[in-house]
Amino acid sequence: MRILVAPDKFKGSIDAVRLCQAIGDSLNSFFPDAEIILRPLADGGDGFASLMGCYFPVETRTVETLDPLGRSIRASYTLTLDRDTAFVEMSVASGLALLTPEERNPEKTDTRGTGILIRDALEQGARHVVLGIGGSATNDGGMGMAHALGYHLLDEHGRELMPCGAFLGALRRILPQNDNHLANVRFTVACDVNNPLYGPEGAACVFGPQKGADPAMVIRLDAGLRNLDEVFCSAFGRSFAALPGAGAAGGLGAGAMAFLGAEMRPGFQLMADLIGLEAEIAAADLVITGEGRLDSQSFQGKVAGEVLDLAERYGKPVYGLCGIRGFDLTKEQSARFAGISTLSDHAPDAMASMTQPQLFIQAALHTLFHVD
């Protein structure tokens, strides 16, 4: 029997690599003669780029960069050994997890740190940069990244702007970088949301509050992103606002398309293509997937739903393992799984299942497969 283990991380609890290993260890005790294939996954959110080292020979580079508030930090990205491809995770330099709740303010934060990581990758010779843009603390439309890569962002008087959310509305002109270091470099963005740049479903309105924006700030940021797209029209000859993923990471999606000419890819699809996941599923007898919370959103481009879609093409049974099950998970959605088991059903309380998930994985799998 060939069992494919292909979950996302349980966010805030356990990363996908350790989760796969814990599941695999338990399965080996249940099915000692089975072939267990471990394939930790991500959907383009935070953690995407860091998983690439599980699948490709890479080296890790750690460089001096800036956090979302412009403070000096050290952050890492990975390069393939031929240095042709770099995998950069914006969250390691511009992520919300780098700030305390009191420090969150998307008018003050920016993505310069992400731009510094990209610049270093280009200096190392990378010709393809894969950028994961989940978990951001920012709402600067990619201005900080562009600034770090040599673009000039000017106000109506021709003065250079601080490239943070507060000055989106003051932007009037974009001048290109002085050299041509972005030429002949391919950029691919792994993105897990399809939101537009601005408006009711845009970056500021949907994601601003979790980054520290109050209602008045959300209005200012949304207006600033509208202005940014108007300047994009002048500088690049087109609007990026309505393209899928433009509003991801505080508008970094739109910024990556405008400043870098990046191709936006749904994170799961990009990763599945890179690692040959569909062939792995086709060769498996059964598949185990999951994420921290299995709910209706799991079927909107998230790992569990996408793995299920692929497995159904080949008639493979899929078992779901999760931390908790959402109340909005419908009977029809549940019925698509051969079985679902949650860690919270086996832990004394929800906090225990989240902080010590390894203690309850074996029991959850025992229930899932009804093994003795």
Image (tube, grey):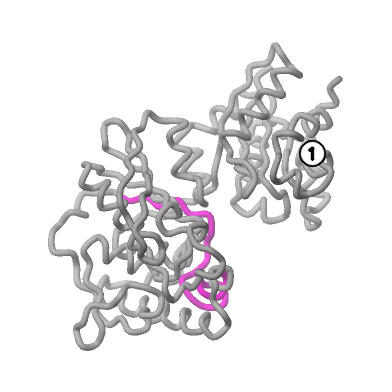
Q: Nearer the viewer, residue 354 or 31?
A: 354
Quadrant housing residue 340: top right
Q: Residue furthest left?
A: 179
Q: Is residue 340 above or below residue 214?
A: above
Could you tell me the amino acid type at mark 1?
A: Ser
Is 288 left or right of 93, judged from the image as shown? right
User: Which quadrant, please, contains the N terminus?
Assistant: top right
Which stretch appears magenta? 187-207
* Residue 195 magenta: yes
The image position of residue 346, as x and y in percent, is: 83, 39
Q: Residue furthest top?
A: 33
The image position of residue 97, as x and y in percent, is: 52, 57
Residue located beneath label 1 in the image:
341
Q: Which residue appears at 82% of the width and 47% of the height?
A: 349
* Residue 56 magenta: no
Q: Which residue appears at 37% of the width and 73% of the height?
A: 164
